[in-house]
Amino acid sequence: MKIIKLLLGIWAYLPVFSLTDDLGFLTANPGSQQHKYYFSIINILFGEKKYQVISIPIKQPGEKLKLFRVKRLSEIETFILSKEEEQDLERKYKEHYDSLDDQERDIEKDALLQHLHSQESRIDISYNKINAFTTIIVAVIPIAITFINREMLISLNLLGKIIFGLVIYATVNLCAWIFQAINVRGYMSSSFKDLKESDEKAKERNWQIYFDWQHTKRKADMFVSFVIYTKHWIIAVIVLTVIFSMGLPFDNQGTIYSDTNRAYTIQTDLAEKTYDESAVEWYNILAQLQTDEYARVFILHNETDVTKIVEKLEQFEKQEISLIFDNTLKKNEIKIILEN
């Protein structure tokens, strides 16, 4: 069961062909037996907003296919107390209040105040966590940006470009959740004017405490959801960054160096200088290529001009030439690897 929930959770975050539950924004609420599933061809997430294209309702007879729709977490019914619900709660609570004696009313008032304080504490804790996330993001992102350069992006293979795109996508969503949580709208609270003008102030006082508790509980649940989704994106960023940093996304130089391949290190400015070691290595490379034993030639460089080297090697038409950026090399230094 846990594996199924995990797979459904991952499925809900996919940007294409995703399955989401509107009652829980992306996934079902814990313990919920009701669902409003939508299968969307495109599912672009931006913090608490989800933009979906061609959404097909699953097991919802009354719903139709929707070409485009936008949903916000803060506008989910679970977090909003409608006017009709508010009036129904007021009627029921005041009927309940009339059935109590004075001692029971005082006991309920103290209990409601305790519940209200508990929900306010949940909001404060959520705010503190979001502030902590903000501090981390502000410190880490500028540092991470310094490691990105044009050469690094060029050296990415197809898998690397996909992972790098997902890292950017996850980071943007992470930042969006944090800033949207900071700017989230307030919530309704009771009015002192209603208490002032009421003829039954004790009843109105208890009702207002109950009313504030109901609204505060919904806002607390919403902020907890903000924190949970922010944590999910933090985990996504960390996992994708670890995969990216393992070197899997790059043209894999580890497979280049093998016992059957030949590797040479030369200085491009000394390759034509007679008797220099680089010149010896260069002419050795040309001699090896004439044997037609090698299918590929890898040129590793660090922003070194290799135009003349490539032009010379292109004279051997049977070998495929690949350029790979390697920031560990010194100025004018390149490595040439001959692969069978």
Image (spheres, rainbow, N blue to C red):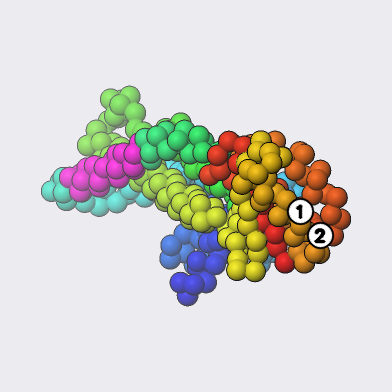
* Residue 126 falls inside the magenta stretch: yes
Q: Which residue is denoted by mark 1 in the rendering?
A: 286
Any mark on residue 45, and which? Answer: none
> Is residue 301 among the parts visible in the rendering?
no
Q: Residue 253's quadrant in the figure?
A: bottom right
Label 1 is placed on what type of residue?
A: Leu
Task: Please provide the residue range marked out in magenta.
Answer: 108-132
Residue at the (51%, 38%) spot, across then down: 147
Q: Residues within 10 Å of mark 1 (few under 14, many from 20)?
A: some
| Contact? badges 1 and 2 (CB < 8 Å) | yes
Task: Determine whether 291 is above or below 160 in the image.
Answer: below
Is residue 317 or residue 227 the one in the foreground?
317
Residue at the (54%, 67%) spot, across then down: 7
Is residue 128 or residue 258 the one in the foreground?
258
Query: x, y (%) of residue 27?
Result: 53, 58
Q: Residue 153's quadrant in the figure?
A: top right
> Is residue 146 among the parts visible in the rendering?
yes
Task: Determine whether 243 is above or below 2 in the image.
Answer: above
Q: Residues within 10 Å of mark 2 (few under 14, many from 20)?
A: few
Q: Is residue 325 left or right of residue 223?
A: right
